[in-house]
Amino acid sequence: MPDNLPPVLDATDRRLLDILQDDCALTNDGLARRAHISPATCLRRVRRLVETGVIERRIAIVSHDALGHGLTAIIEVSLAQQSAEALAAFESRVAGEPEIQQCYRVSSGPDFVLVVHVRDMPAYHAFVHRVLTTEANVRNVRSFFSVRRSKFAPRIRV
């Protein structure tokens, strides 16, 4: 199968993915029991899902509020130069910033949309100054602040 085609997923693979999206901390035996398959089959299938890139990584979702990171900003960033090199350089620059939870290169509007979590407004200003205003190629920054999160669902329908 060519590398650019997604792997074929059967009903068992989809069931495993659905269960893992609810709780990725299950043991192999627990996952196998919930998926109604043998532990050996479960282990083999999950390994294949990881090796083929269907499962990117297994993580815990931590509450921002519980850690005191109560301010969420959605930031639109427009660059002065949009060459492939300039776009890649900006992506590379922001990839290492711990406050940035998500970074999207978008079209028909700004060049990037960032989802940023910080403790409070002074931390937001420090972040913007350190990351965005010192970046020579940033032409415009427009920020929106979350008043309330009404939905957060990292689950992908399988």
Image (cartoon, grey):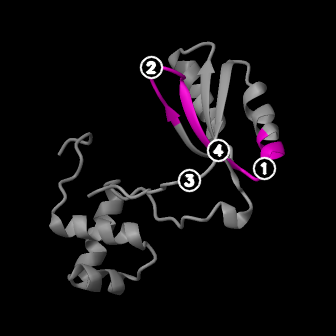
Q: Position of residue 40 (x, y in %)?
A: 25, 82
Q: Earlier in the sequence, mark 3 or mark 1?
A: 1
Vertical side of 36 occupied by 58: above or below: above
Amino acid at pointer 3: Arg
Q: Position of residue 87 (x, y in %)?
A: 55, 23
Q: Earlier in the sequence, mark 2 or mark 3?
A: 2
**Over which residues does the magenta segment extend?**
104-124
Report the mark closest to the observer, 1 or 4: 1
Q: CA distance from mark 2 to mark 3?
A: 25 Å
- Residue highlighted by disc 3: 149
Q: Earlier in the sequence, mark 3 or mark 4?
A: 4
Q: CA distance from mark 2 to mark 4?
A: 21 Å
Q: Earlier in the sequence, mark 2 or mark 1?
A: 2
Report the residue at 72% width, 29% height from top: 132
Q: CA distance from mark 1 to mark 4?
A: 11 Å
Is 1 in front, or is 108?
108
Q: CA distance from mark 2 to mark 1?
A: 30 Å
Question: SS for tag 2?
Answer: loop
Quadrant housing the C terminus: bottom left
- Residue highlighted by disc 4: 116
Crowding near the residue tagged with mark 2, few <14, some 14–19, many ≥20 C-alpha atoms within 10 Å: few
Report the residue at 73% width, 24% height from top: 135
Instruction: Tell me if I can see residue 98 in this picture.
Output: no
- Residue highlighted by disc 1: 120
Amino acid at pointer 4: Val
Crowding near the residue tagged with mark 3, few <14, some 14–19, many ≥20 C-alpha atoms within 10 Å: few
Is 32 in front, or is 128?
128
Instruction: Tell me if I can see residue 6 in this picture.
Output: yes
Mark seen at residue 108: 2
State yes or no: residue 141 in magenta. Answer: no
Question: SS for tag 3?
Answer: loop
Q: Position of residue 69 (x, y in %)?
A: 71, 56
